[in-house]
Image (tube, grey):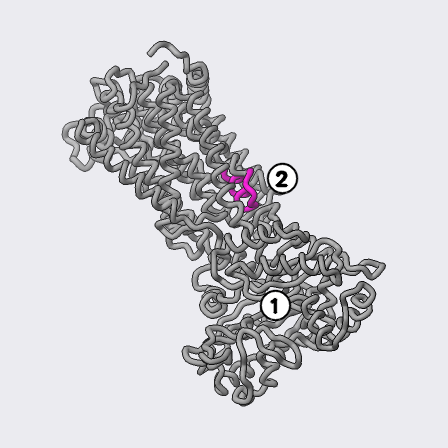
Amino acid sequence: MGKCHMDCIERPLSLGLEKLGHFVGCHPWWFFITPLVLSAGLGSGFYFITDRMSNDIEEQFTPVNGKAKMERRYIQENFPENNSMFSNLRLSTDGTFATFIATSDSNVLTVESLQEILDLDRKVRTMVVSFDNKPFEYVNLCARVEGNCYSNDILDIIDYTASNIDLVSLTFPWYYYKSQRVALYASLGSVKLNKENSVVESAQAIQLRYYLQEDNKTKTDRWLEDFLNLLSNVSTTSTKVSYSTSMSMQWEIEKFPDAVTPLFAITYTIAITFSIMSCWRLDNVTNKVWVAYGGVFVTALTILSSFGMLLLIGQPFVITVASCPFMILGIGIDDMFIMVSCWQRTNFFDRVPKRLADTYKDAAVSITITTLTDALALFLGYTSTFHSVQAFCLYGGLSVVFCYLYNITFLGALMALNGQREEKNRHWFTCSVIPYDLPSDKSKCFTFWCDGGSYDPKTNMEKMHPMNHFFKKFYGPFLTQKWIKLCVLVIYAGYLAVSIYGCYTLEEGLDISNLALDGSYIIDYYDDQSLHFSEYSLSVMVAVKQPLHYWSEDDQKNLSSCIDNFENLNYVNNTFAWFLSFQQYANAASLNINSQQAFQRHLPEFLDRSPMFRQDINFTSDNEIQASRFFIQIVNETSTKDTLIGLRKTAEQCEVKLLVYHPAFIYFDQYTVILQDTIVTILVAAVVMLVISLMLIPSVLCSLWVAFAICSVIVGVMGFMALWGVNLDSISMINLVMCIGFSVDFSAHISYSFVSSSKDDVNEKAQDAVAHLGYPVLQGAVSTILGVVVLSISAGYVFRTFFKIMFLVIGFGLFHGLMFIPVFLTLFGICRKC
């Protein structure tokens, strides 16, 4: 291979960092104190953390420019809600409500069970709540229909008398009550019907809802809180009750900081313990205990500075950001291990500035590569369409930058100060000078605690750590044997096959119930909702966005064709429309409405009889219909993503301009963008990682192998996370973006060391790379996993998902760095420094 001059960036960077290391070694106190002062100043931003909290579920966990948000805007502008004629069917949002589900293993439609439900309903309606020192009840803030509180259909049907259930024959899913068609599927769940007709024989669940006016949020929130307190203390004998409110999930999200805060202390204790154990030396002079403390302390300074800086400039703080300290802990300690390893390979008799310069020359380029990849991967993730992902990537990316800066300043200064102690042969703890030749009459115990200052006379370096010795003398030669290489290839083929299979089983979308903490009352409610009320899922609005001549045969035909297209979908069960009801009314009254004059004359009469339909028609000032809407009932026959895409596609294909909308579509929009968003982000980041590798690793082939490692690890993580029960959603996407950077780390360290090796034979180069960085890479992997392992016991899905994907990323990254990449480098081309 001829000269290709690939070191035009790596060489000057290495020289520059060497000079920086020398300068830090000469003036360690400046670089030790300055980061402390800077962190203290920027850390003042934590004063504003409460004000910067932004955990609104819709804002953070739905696409920023989701199509449903534009559809909602159209609905709200053209079909404003009527406070005097409340209709939950016509809400453009979820509304403000409280609800409970009463279930029974056999039949909830018994007199005994219904009496318990009626008693509970009465308690809810008569519950006295205090606000501004004034008492009020449900009747004072309930959503109203023609002056009366919104009521539950099933209770109206039995006239609030449990024994009346024996006098009515309920038909399902629709029941006609007082000339009105009632959707019983919203009230009754897990229904058993008579085989000969649609009469209900039994039901296992009843759901009641209590909708509130939305003009005073503080007041309604207070009522909702008391509702939760009431239901949490309720006692029933024949039914089991689960409950929730429109604010429950939001309040659950806000509990996350209190749930995760104790884990920080545990994590940092584990990290400090592991770092000390890894850096401990029996030699009392060359012991690196204080450097280990410094490596962990750097992460604390990093969080203080990066988070504080963003909080000072007003950046919102989202709950997903709470995972960043665990990530930074792994990065910071990994870099510390690399620097300690390089320090140990410097000449024991050189002065501190020279040793630190050699350390920076050897280590700083390697950690610069990983810092650039980690930071850029996260900053590229800021282009995501989810605010929660953007926030994590911004906080995480800036944290990586500060971690790097503090490693080459604060940690470097600490290593220099520690080096000055070693240079004077002082004890690591007492700082007392240890004589080079201890008197022979001293006890073994005295020698163990006071001996120090030894080195390898053959190399003039510190004595090799036993783990370094293992990688150099045993693991490296073992890995480069021909039959072992063959085994590695077989293992990799199996890994790839399982990963690809997992990718095909990967499911998309965030289940909102996963945002609740384990053990929350809301989990029981969502479970009952899914078990008993999932068959009839949504009543979707279909808005007609253009003026139509509803009396015209052509327009009637076009609209009827559109309805037929919807009803031909296997997941559309029924259509409910004002113009269909108007036609039935006209037929029953023998009215001819096939002319404009007759249609416009009889329509007001119909709307007077059915005033709820007025909300479905948007009249102009000239009494022309410029827009209207109807409803289609959806049943769970296909996936949420296919349902949403299918409805929108059907609307677009109609000759009439239509729009489909339901408040749940705000959340369903994630299904339409999450996969594309993730793939684009990963591809762009992978290309950027390749460019960085080409710039900083002076070998084209090795740079390509680093890029290969990125793709390979990502495929593995996506495949195995599917097999581990993790969906592709905004939470896991955060971790996949982070995965791009982490997947580079270990392979980049080994590849750079491989290229930089002075050996000629590829097997010797691989052995050299593994000997030099095998142990630091292993230390970094173990420290990162230990940094997140406590998240596995977290009560929150967000943090457990973070642990699972981090575990996969680090595990697969470690295998690539210490097994796959060294073998591939020896098999597929010679990578030498250009």
Q: Secondary structure at mark 2?
A: loop
Please provide percent x and percent y for residue 377: 48, 34
Segment tinted magenta in the rendering: 383-399
Q: What's the magenta bit mostly, secondary-structure-wise?
A: helix
Residue at image mark 2? 313
Which label sits in the foreground, 1 or 2?
1
> Which residue is more in the foreground, 540 or 26?
540
> Which residue is more in the foreground, 459 or 474?
474
> Which residue is more in the foreground, 671 or 703?
671
Mark 1 / mark 2, whichever is N-terminal: 1
Q: Quadrant of the N terminus?
A: top left
Q: Residue furthest right?
A: 622
Please tell me how many numbered marks the rendered image carries.
Answer: 2
- On screen, residue 655 versus residue 636, left or right, reads right
Which label was assigned to residue 97?
Answer: 1
Q: Secondary structure at mark 1?
A: strand
Give the Cα separation between the discs numbered 1 and 2: 36 Å
